[in-house]
Every structure is written in C-alpha cells, then in structure tokens.
Image (tube, rainbow, N blue to C red):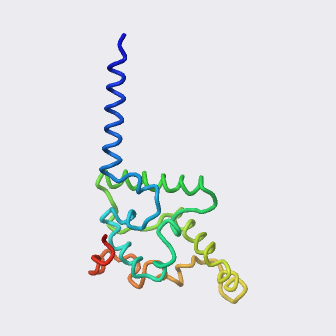
Amino acid sequence: MTKTPIVIALAAAAAAFGTFAWATDAPAMLGSKPETCATCHVMDAVYENWYHGAHQPWATCSDCHLPHENVVAYYFEKGRAGMHDAYVFTLGTPPQVIRATENTRRIVQNNCVRCHEQTVENVVMGAQEFDRNCWDCHRSAAHGQRGISLVPLPDNVIYNK
C-alpha cells in the first residue's frame, strides 16, 4: 500500500494550520503586547482607556489579568481565557458590557497586591477595612477616568502602528 495519501493529508493539514497561524497572527497570542488584546473590536475602548490611564507606562494587560504564581498557571489561564474569547466571538455572542468574572477579579486583586505590596502593607496597618478589592477605591487607576466605557477616545491614531 502506498504512503502517498498519508503524506498528502499531512501536507494539507500542515498547510491549513500554517495558513491559519499566518492569517490570524496566532503567534502574537503567546506574547503580552496590549495591542494583541485589542485585536477584538469589543476591546477598543478598554485598550484606549488603559492607554490613557496611569498604568500604561508600567503594566500590560497580562500583568494585571493573568496569574503570576508560576508559568503553568500563567499559560493555563491565558489559554483558558483565549479559548473562551474565541468561542464567544466565533459564535457572535460577545457581551454588550464586559464584566470581570469572579476568577478574573481574584487574579486582578492578587496582582494589585503583588505589584503594590509595600503600599498594601501600609493600608493593612492603618484604619482601612481590608475586605474590599483595590478597585473599590482606585476605580480609575488601570483604565483611566473613563473606566471601561464602551465609547473609545477619538485619538486612536496615536498608537495604531
């Protein structure tokens, strides 16, 4: 029996996978550039608000929205969230308003504490109640004064390169 059909099938699969990876810029999804997160139009305003916010010079999307306990947890959550987003956007059912899940809120809170450990220690030693999330008081810190408004700022030409 000839191996030609198997070789042709494998070559076709490799070509299809390569074309998919090239067309979707799939390797970029493994990185941490905020522009990659903004490839979905529903994230335009979130990206623009982060771009104009206080954390833009210091933190990217993955610094806040992915766990940093270890590389396995990081890439597991990156893959899980990415597959969820691909599923939602492929079916054409993205939410009108993006809201953080309980898991996302936990990850973001842990990352606030991770980056601002000294400040958090000062807060804990003070009179503040410590049963709140950081963004309860610092709502505009990560995504600017506009929070996560669905209406983008008009100067998106600045960072679209």
Observer-nearest of 95 and 85? 85
Q: Quadrant of residue 50?
A: bottom left
- The residue positioned 31% from the left and 38% from the top of the image is 16
Observer-nearest of 9 and 94? 9
Q: Is residue 61 above or below residue 29?
A: below
Observer-nearest of 128 and 36? 36
- The residue positioned 57% from the left and 62% from the top of the image is 67
Q: Which residue ends up furthest to the top in the rendered image?
A: 1
Q: Quadrant of residue 126?
A: bottom right
Task: Count how many numbered circles sit on residues in the image.
Answer: 0
Spot occupied by residue 24 in the image (x, y as percentages of width and height): 32, 52
Spot occupied by residue 6 in the image (x, y as percentages of width and height): 36, 22
Q: Quadrant of residue 8?
A: top left
Q: Is residue 67 above or below residue 129?
A: above
Spot occupied by residue 116 in the image (x, y as percentages of width and height): 62, 78
| Figure quadrant of the C terminus | bottom left
- The residue positioned 68% from the left and 81% from the top of the image is 118
Q: Which residue ends up furthest to the right in the rendered image?
A: 125
| Figure quadrant of the N terminus | top left
Spot occupied by residue 96 in the image (x, y as percentages of width and height): 32, 66
Q: Is residue 93 left or right of residue 71?
A: left
Q: Is residue 15 left or right of residue 73?
A: left
